[in-house]
Image: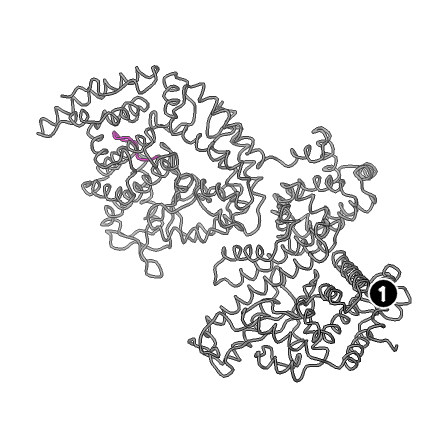
Amino acid sequence: MGSVEDLLLPTVLPDALRPAVARAEERLSDALIQADRLANQQQLDPPSRGYHALSKERREQLTRVLGLSEFALDSLARYPSWLMHLDANDELDTAPASEVQRQWLVEALAQAEHEAAMQAALRRFRRARLLGIVWRDMTRPAGTDMWATAAAVARLAEVCLEGALGWLEAHFAPRWGLPAPRADGGTQRLVVLGMGKLGAGELNLSSDIDLIFAFPEKGTTEGGKREFDHQEYFTKLGQKLIAALDAITADGFVFRVDMRLRPLGEGGPLVGSFAMLSSYYQDQGREWERYAMLKARPVAGDLEAGFELLAGLQPFVYRRYLDFGAIESLREMKALINREVKRRGMSSNIKLGPGGIREVEFVVQVFQLIRGGRDTELQVTSLRQALTRLPDLDLLPQAVVDELLPDYVFLRDLEHALQALEDRQTQSLPADDQDRARVAEYLRLQDWPALVARLEAARERVRRHFDAVIADPEEDAEESNGSSREEIDVTLDELRALWRHELAKEEALGLLRGAGFQEPEATLRRINGLRQSKSVQGMQRIGYERLDALMPLLLNALGENDAPDRALERLLPLIEAVLRRTAYLALLRENPEALGHLIRLCAASPWIAEQIARYPILLDELLTPSTLYAPADKQRLADELRQTLARLPEDDEEAQLEALRIFKHAQVLHVAASDIAGARPLMKVSDYLTYIAEVMLEQVLVMAWKHLVRKHGYPKRREDARSDADFIIVGYGKLGGIELGYGSDLDLVFIHDAATQGTTDGKRPIDNALFFTRLGQRIIHLLTTMTQAGALYEVDMRLRPSGNSGLLVTTFDAYADYQRQHAWTWEHQALVRARAVAGDDTLAKRFEELRREILARRRDPDQLREEVVKMRHKMRDHLGSSPKAQEAGRFDLKQDAGGMVDIEFLCQYAVLAMSHENPELLAFSDNIRILETLESTDRLPGGDAGRLRDAYLAYRDATHRAALTKQQDTGSEADFREHRQTVTALWQRLLEPDA
């Protein structure tokens, strides 16, 4: 019954493959005849019976598999009965779970009494499982695609590694013993890290596996015939594990093992302790090793300890800053590969050649290396996961990913087709016509020319996207200013020679003059001063190379600016500030557009230049113009901050404080950039700055509340029930009036409404009053503590009841009583610009009701006018311009008569004097809308209100400009004379008619 004539169905394959099908049928028939004879001798069912019982669909699949894969044919010719076993296990349609495979392998290895038997069992197990994988990859049952195939091979490798390691540990335990426990009492096992595609869980059909071996702690083995130092024990065990998988026997091999990614490569120890590995990567780790470690994942042995090791190595792999130096390293790595490909004539290699698999991997991994420390969503080993997350992080357009992903899948499918031919690791296209026909049919393409056409199109797209990400910035210079490539090369070469002091002085001055510098002598002195500085002379080689590459690009870009001399003067302190953090030099070199934004912003604002020099991490913001010039509204700010903090451990307050400060600086930079670009009117600038402060306060309150509750429990409420917090932060002054400037501090008052006599309910209870006092102190601490990224805000608490002598946190009832019974008129003036900016919504509403009640009181207009005028004169005397400044024609925009504060006092007087008759005046805390309400309620003629608004906006705009240009809030009296006369006339008419 052994013959299988007519079992295969040649018509399911193209005519070109009919000879392959006939040969497969002949080999399988011979194998079944032999298998049937053996079965008869053993009184078993003949295997051929199962073949003849196959359905037509299964016979079509069998024909396809045997016609396209010599590996599959060899496997079934050697083990004909495997097809029935695979079918019975449903492996022809579904990948078995890892746990099921582990159990199968444990049962197979249980009968192995020596290494040779273990190796034979492993190899048969691997061949059987791989046959099922190849079958599914060729026939594509539901749920099977390239990713499923790659994941199935990776799972198979993990099962084989763990099975072999477990058998070796048990087999050699009587002789070698087992490792001593860790210091914490936990057991020690070998840690096997899978690298490359194994670590990614995306292994190809006939891949080798890249491994690194490690162990947690030094010590000596216990319980064996002799003791071994852990280093020696794990080395011997690692050698045995490699042989178990890699050695070629009569049954073939399991997986080829590559250990060259370990520290020091082939010259280093086979196994390293955690301490040794941590020390190595910290002190000697190279850029390509960071690239390799992106894919590291524990795959066998002590998985938990493996994750512990990788957590410790994370700072080496993922830098806290944006690391554009990684592009240089990947560019160099790719150049080495290209030279090797060219030398060996491998341009058609679909992995290493142009537009190949490796270029897609480089595109993804460059973003992981550059941004993975900040965008923790990229800290994944899977290429598929990382690539699909890039659009949401605005790192690659969705359209690019929509091209790269299917092209990568096609290249990997093609790789699988090549390797399934003979279970051989290859990425080279076949020259043999029959193999070409097999590969084309494997991919279900019409013929070889159709495959080549699709391959060339895919490689062209991949190469284009790869070049866009990895290209050298000097190659992009031609596109940036429209000059020819030759002109750009000459200009950059000349500027490079100037930077290196290789030009005669007159030649250098002429070059600078031609580049647009108005003060070439001073500019040349500055350039030479930087080059000759101790900081530059003491730089390490890689840092100096980055500076040397940047300076010609910087000088060239400066020439495009209207004020290159001023821009260079402001930029040099920034360059000096990042000489020891040269990844920022790489960032600017690799991103000419960001360099252009930096020059424009610094030329316009010394304040921005100073901020970026102080906090170079802000350079990251220059990479995304869509957000740089478009500040976020309050909801988006809150969402982005929540996402930023979600990436950090909740108990790492230091990291959270740093993140808050960096976030705040970045958002303020966005506002300033849009302000300079003229993209936002003045009122919107203050709105955005106020939104930032409010979001910061809300988050700081949450952090402070959680800190206190963890220590002391929840404070007792009046109704003896819990809520998130019976607490509000009230903003006064510019914060309350929604008029924050770039350097504004925050005027705050803290109010709570919990039980006055209660205590907290935690393990360390304290009085409610003490709880809220500490809450207030904690908030101030979080806002004002200096970190590497500075402080969040300066805080002024003097407007609380009784000022500095009053309680830091006031109960609502006490605050209300103070406002009703004891507050001075100036304190009610301040209340006009007060509003709750963070905390409990219910208490915030009660505060607003109280504010309205106090402000709407009927007051004696003459007495009110007298007190307001008296306070204003006192302020002018103490804070206004000196007689000498006034004689010089200077005008203090805020404090001098006719300035901003006069307008603010006019508004506050109007609210206090008129809101009992016109409650509409109570709706707003900002001066502009109060003036608009005075006009709409006919309390102030439209012309007067309009002129006051114009003056106020002019003054505020000037103070904003002064902040950005680091000048004082003073102007020429002549420039503001008309506004000043308007304000002074209205002041006298409304508040000092008898003056």
Q: Is residue 986 left or right of residue 367?
A: right
- The spot of residue 815 in percent (x, y) is 61, 79
> Relative to residue 868, is residue 841 depicted above or below?
above
Residue at the spot of label 1: 982
- Position of residue 696 in the picture relative to residue 8 (left or right): right
Nearest the eye: 403 or 250: 403
Q: Is residue 571 visible?
A: no
Relative to 296, say whether 185 is above or below: below
The question of residue 251 being in magenta is answered with: yes
Q: Amino acid at mark 1?
A: Thr
Q: Residue at x 83, y 43 (%)?
A: 518
Q: Where is 102 relative to 134, above or below? A: below
User: Quarter of the image containing the N terminus?
Assistant: top left
Q: Which segment is the magenta one?
A: 248-255
Foreground residue among 445 and 379: 445
Could you say whether the residue bearing mark 1 is in a helix, strand or loop?
helix
**How many residues crowd mark 1 within 10 Å: few (<14), some (14–19), many (20+)?**
some
The residue drawn where x is 52% and y is 25% is 342
Residue 762 can be seen, yes or no: yes
Q: Could you tell me which residue is drawn at 55 percent across and 52 percent down?
A: 320
Tell me the quarter of the image containing the C terminus: bottom right
731 or 661: nearer the viewer: 731
Q: Please provide percent x and percent y for residue 585.
A: 64, 45
Q: Quadrant of residue 728?
A: bottom right
Q: Position of residue 701 (x, y in %)?
A: 55, 67
Q: Principal SS element in the magenta part?
A: loop
Q: Is residue 713 magenta?
A: no
